Amino acid sequence: MQRVLISGAGIGGPALAFWLLRRGLSPTLIERAPRFRDGGYMIDVWGLGYELVERMGLLEAALERAYVIDRLAFVDEAGRRVSGFDADAFRRAFMGRFFSIPRGDLARLVFGAVESHVETLYSTSIEALAQDDSGVDVELSGGRSRRFDIVVGVDGLRSRVRECVFGGPERFEKYLGYCAASFVTRGYPHRDEGSYLSFARPGRQISRYALREDRSAFLLVFAQDERLEIPPHDTAAQKRVLRERFGADGWECPEILERLDGADDLYFDAVSQIRAPSWSRGRVVLVGDAAYCPSLLAGAGSAFAMLGAYALAGEMERAGANHAAVFAAYERRLRPFIEEQQKKAVRFASSFAPRTALGLSLRNAALGLMRIEPVAAWYSRRMFGSSPDLSSYTQGATSPSGPS
C-alpha cells in the first residue's frame, strides 16, 4: 500500500484524503497550525466546485450552511446605490447550481468527512525532504522523521513543500498589484441581510456582508504598486496600513476601521498568483494554491484545490504506484484549463479596485448591464462557465459520513 503524506489540512488536503481513502489508501495529513482552521472569507461555489461538493456527498450539508446573496450593490458616501445587480442572474445562468458559503464552513465539512479515518498531525511542518528511487524521507518539526512513497503539497500560496523541492516564492509568485484584508466582527449595526455592499474610491474598495449569529464580515482591497513587506503576524502594522488607506474615506469606513481595532482574526496578504512551470518533481507533487493559485480575488482557489485533488486521485486510480505517470497525466489534464483561468483572474482582479475615477465609472456602468439577463448569462458563462472534463474518472459520490 502506498504511503502518502499530504501537507495542508485546509480544503484541498482533506479532499485529496477523501478520494484516496476511497481507493483503499490511508494518507497522513499534517498541518502547521495548532488546530483545525475554520476561518476565512465568503466563497462562491459553482460549476466544477458545485459538482465536486456533490460528488463527495456533501451538497445537502453545504446548502444548509450556505448564504443566499440576493444583490450586489455599490454605494456612494451617503449609502445611496450607484450600481449593482441582482444575484439571481448568476444563479439562473448556472441553473441554480450556485451558492455562497464561508470558506471555513466548507473546510469543516470536507475535513469532517475524513477526520476519523486519517492520521492528522497538527503543529507539524516539514523541515526537509530527501528523495531516492524508492521513497521520500521527511524531516518533520520536533525532530521527527518519517518515510513516504509520495508527498503532496496542498499547503497554500506560501507552500513549504514547494520551497523545499522547487525553490523560493520569488521564482513562482506573480504579484498582481493589490493587497486584500478580511475580518469578522459581532454586533455591527448595519446589516442589509442578503446583500453584498461595497464602497469604492480610486484604487481601493471596502465591502461588507451579514453573517449568522449577529456577525458581519468585511473585505478591504487596495492597489499597491510595490509589494508591502509586512511580516504575516505583524497585525499592528497591517492595521496601520489599512487605516492609512481608508481613514479619509466616507460611507461607513470610520465605523468599519473602529471595528478593526478589536479584530483578532485579521487576514492580510498580497494578491498574487502562483505559476509553476512544473507541478511535480520526482515523488513530490503540488496541488491547489501551492501549484496554481489563481489569486484571492478570483474566488476560485478552493474549487481549484478540490479539482486538483480529484484529478490526482483519479490518475492514481489509473496508474497506481507509477508516480511519474500519475503526475504527468494529472498536469496534462489540468494545466490548459488552469492557465486559461489564471488569465481571466488577472483581468477580474483589476475590477475590484480600479485606480482612476474613470475606471470606477466604467466598472459601475458595466455592472449595471448585469441587470440585463442575457448579458449576465453571457458574462457568467464566459468568465466562470468552463471546466475540464471529469467524466473519465470513475470516482463517484458517497455519503457525507465518510468514504466507503
Image (cartoon, rainbow, N blue to C red):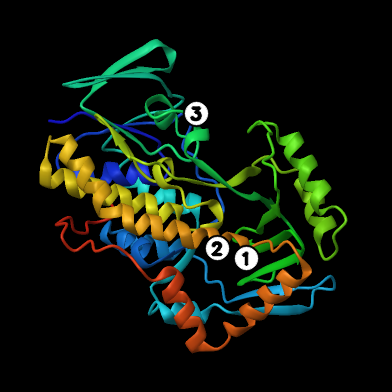
- The residue located at (68%, 76%) in the rendering is 362
**Can you see residue 402?**
no
For the residues labelled 3 and 2, say whether their Cβ atoms are less than 8 Å apart: no
Where is residue 210, by image quadrant?
A: bottom right
- Dot 3 falls on a residue whose secondary structure is loop
Marks 1 and 3: in contact by CB < 8 Å?
no
Q: Is residue 115 left or right of residue 319?
A: right
The amino acid pointed to by label 2 is Arg
- State the CA–CA distance, disc 3 to disc 2: 36 Å
Q: Residue at x 40, y 60 (%)?
A: 340
- Up-down relation of residue 394 to residue 266 (above or below): below
**According to the image, label 1 marks what residue?**
351
Check disc 2 and report the residue beneath it: 347
Instruction: For marks 3 and 1, give the one nearer the viewer.
Output: 1
Q: Secondary structure at mark 1?
A: loop
> Residue 34 has which mark?
3
Q: Give x and y (percent) for residue 298.
A: 51, 58
| Chain-order first, disc 3 or disc 2 | 3
Question: Farthest right residue?
Answer: 248
